[in-house]
Image (cartoon, coloured by chain):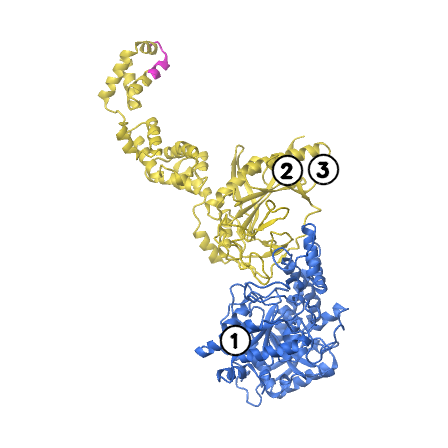
Chain colours: A blue, B yellow
Amino acid sequence: MSLENSSLRELAAALAAKQLSSVELTQRFLDRIAAANPALNAFVTTDPERSLAQARAADARRARGDATPLTGIPIAHKDIWCAKGWRTTCGSRMLANFASPYDAHVVERFDAAGAVLLGKCNMDEFAMGSSNETSWFGPVKNPWNPAFVPGGSSGGSAAAVAARLAPAATGTDTGGSIRQPAALCGISGLKPTYGVVSRYGMIAFASSLDQGGPFAKSAEDLALLLNAMAGFDARDSTSLDRAPEDYTRLLAAPVPGAPADRPLAGLRIGLPRQYFGAGLAPDVAEAVETALAELRRLGAATSEVDLPASDLAVPAYYVIAPAEASSNLSRFDGVRYGHRAAEYGDLVDMYCRSRAEGFGAEVKRRILIGTYVLSHGYYDAYYLKAQKIRRLIAEDYARAFAQVDVIAGPTSPTVAFEFGAKTADPVQMYLNDIYTIPANLAGLPGLSIPAGFGAGGLPVGLQLVGNYFDEARMLAIAHQYQHVTDWHRRAPAGY
Amino acid sequence: MQWETVIGLEVHAQLSTRSKIFSGASTAFGAAPNTQACAVDIALPGVLPVLNRGAVERAIRFGLAIGAKVNRTSIFARKNYFYPDLPKGYQISQYEQPIVEGGAIRIVTRGGEKTVRLTRAHLEEDAGKSLHEDFHGMSGIDLNRAGTPLLEIVSEPDMRSSEEAVAYARALHALVRWIDICDGNMQEGSLRADANVSVRPLGSDVLGTRCEIKNLNSFRFLERAIEYEVRRQIGIIEDGGRIVQETRLYDPDRDETRSMRSKEEAHDYRYFPDPDLLPLAVSEKWIDEVRAGLPELPEAKRARYEREWGLPAYDALTLTASRELASYFEDVVGAGIEPKLAANWVMGDVAAALNRSDLDIAASPVSSAALAGLLARIRDNTISGKIAKDVFDAMWAGEGGADEIIEKRGLRQITDASAIEKLVDDVLAANPKSVEEFRAGKEKAFNALVGQVMKASRGKANPAAVNELLKKKLAG
């Protein structure tokens, strides 16, 4: 098998067997990026010298005999993670000149594991978008068809992994920004339980919803990546202080005592009535049904569950996320770093011009919405009410998880759409995340894995949402599915 | 018409933690600009706040000291506004659920004692500092102070004069130092007050429209600003005008307050719970631990001084102005000196000498033990109270301990009856006129004779013995 199609374990084995060095592996991916990125625009920044220096250090470390499973493996980071010495733009003109003086916790963790930072991936501006069309650095193309969006906001990371420009990548997910692009690009992506991955050094969009997670070709790779990313960080007050766990531990046997040919026997999968109704495209529905039949063949039982507050999720999200964002983005004022207008009159004029020039239209729209819903006299009607809805959604899930072990359904209501198809109507754009947003509101883990293809030969994603801290079992279910299917091995033509 | 002034104060006390409320940067005063501002303080993209337990502990101390309710759960909110010295574009502060609610502080003025109720006290972070000079038309920003922990202490509108407001501010100042949560250094901005002032016709129970005077950083400015503001408001109303609710600034150079912004111009701060910080939970156990670590409070000490030691209320109040003063006084009493004698000396000669030398009690050149040594010599009649003052001055000047000075200067009191009798005889012989006057019924003459004897003894004769002997001789 070619290097770019290898799993992380295969790459680690090749490195361990000295079949190749990290420098060779890194160079290989850098070459692929150099060739493909002008068309795909998946990377905002690469720095081959810096990456190769890390690769040399990784080779030396391996030679010393203290390699980890990720030592020498190149990983691409969504450009939302601060990495010392790297330009960290968050897809915005506001930070187009910002070189971070410090490392995010996640970047530190990958450094500590000996991974190589391959480059920074394009994204929707400040993670606000579902199509990667809001980036100051231009849209990312979907490797399956360059006329179509890769999804967002972590579209660069998803496209990079799908096009085999990186073995793995990181992303962040506030309302679906890992799962939706993973689905639209035909790869695997995981949003962990809120608090599992530290947000320190991750540029905030909506603090109570943001959660970092990995992209890879397979669930097994995701588990290895999460082992590195997860962990308590005292610098993030919402980071959970839990004993470290090995997310690969259940891969081979998700259900204790299940027979080898029916490894999911005894597993109860809930299918939310609300996720299979109007609005779900027939091609996606068909692919998801086929995937569910596969899960049943593996021994799982499926039953319908009810998540009655689901239809309130998108409206609630578009109150809470903009509210938090309007405040989080206040620090970008042109005073200390970031974009400052070249000419201005007084202080207020400096703020207005710097922010008018530094932020794009979607970011401005959300700052306006967020400012509005937090305003005196509107707070109770919007923000407080949205928080109550959030509680209802969490309660829906709690009731469902009393009946089933995991929830399955489509990740996105459609396959990838064409550039410009939804830019004129923000609400249509927002409805893309209708199946992913509820997990963020409840803080639950969710993942998306490739489950075949729909119209135009574009990928379809199957979403699993689990109970809090159930990542290991969810990854194992996905792994078992990937054991009997090969959707995750399919690469877009030309890559 | 007679007017009544109504005042409520919001006092910001800088908590004495070594590091900031949400970051590990130092809070030390006076460093070069921006040398004590870390990534969190300058609000780099991606940084997050982590609450300093020490700041919470100090807020709990305060709550317990004023008999307030310490909330088991309190919430940090974001107060959103743009200003260059506010790096995040919002201040983290407690809004709907503060850590401390209620409580009261007793104050003493010429009008007597009074209780001022507190509304609440909440934790928040300070902003940085904008420097508008020396930058040739630009402004400099110093973020050293950004993130410094503050306790904002809000009173009910219970004060009725500038005197009461100052007494309250002083009581608060003494208390925060007493319980060791704030250094009280007003010049460095460690304690500053905003005063809400309104007036109303005497007897009315409806509050007038108030103005808030911001950032008063001395007791004197607080007093002057309130007095000016009261005159201003009464003047407007008596001229048929109306008070406009607004924020005002006091200008000490011109001794007046000036409008800063009206209610209409006020910001909409768009408060909402800070999603980066969990609700602050304070356990019963933590509160118990903090309570156990509290020193005896001034209130309790005052009561004890009056009850156990029979001190007048004024003495008890004066001696509990600070923990250091009280502890000095208690050390003197602990060395076996009668409380009233000790109180008189500590509040009198010691306080006067400290005042002259501009020193704190802790830096007194005469230690509590040394003072007790001196007072013991009064009690055992080695010296008179009058001589003791001279000995004290010598001790203050560093000439040694009381006994050493008494010996060296030969100040030991003459108690030997025959020695005193000789002095008395000499004085009677030398002052026949006074003796005649006394016998004619002039009491004053007696005092003059006592004075002569004392003078002849150079102050060393025991005054009681002199009195007694003189009376006997003159009667004889």
Residue labelled with disc 2: B257
Residue B223 position in % (x across, y down): 57, 36
Residue B353 vs residue B41, the one in the foreground: B41
* Residue B446 belongs to magenta span: yes
Asked if residue B26 is positioned above or below residue B383 in the image, the reply reads: below
At x 53% / y 60%, what residue is drawn?
B50
For label 2, the crowd category at 10 Å Cα-Cα, with few meaning under 14, some 14 to 19 and many 20 or more, is many
Residue labelled with disc 3: B242
Residue type of the residue flagged with mark 1:
Ala
The chain identifier of the residue carrying mark 1 reads A
Q: Which residues are magenta?
A: B439-448
Residue labelled with disc 1: A55
Mark 1 or 3: in front is: 1
Residue type of the residue flagged with mark 2:
Thr
Is label 1 in contact with label 3 (beta carbons under 8 Å)?
no
Residue B467: quadrant of the picture: top left
Give the number of callouts. 3
Mark 3 or 2: in front is: 2
Name the main secondary structure of what is drawn in magenta. Answer: helix
Residue A186 position in % (x across, y down): 66, 80
Mark 3 and mark 2: Cα distance apart in space: 17 Å
| SS class, disc 2 | strand
Residue B217 position in % (x across, y down): 55, 41
The chain identifier of the residue carrying mark 2 reads B
Asked if residue A366 is positioned above or below residue A270 in the image, the reply reads: above
* Residue A7 belongs to magenta span: no
Mark 2 and mark 1: Cα distance apart in space: 66 Å
Q: Quadrant of the C terminus of chain A?
A: bottom right
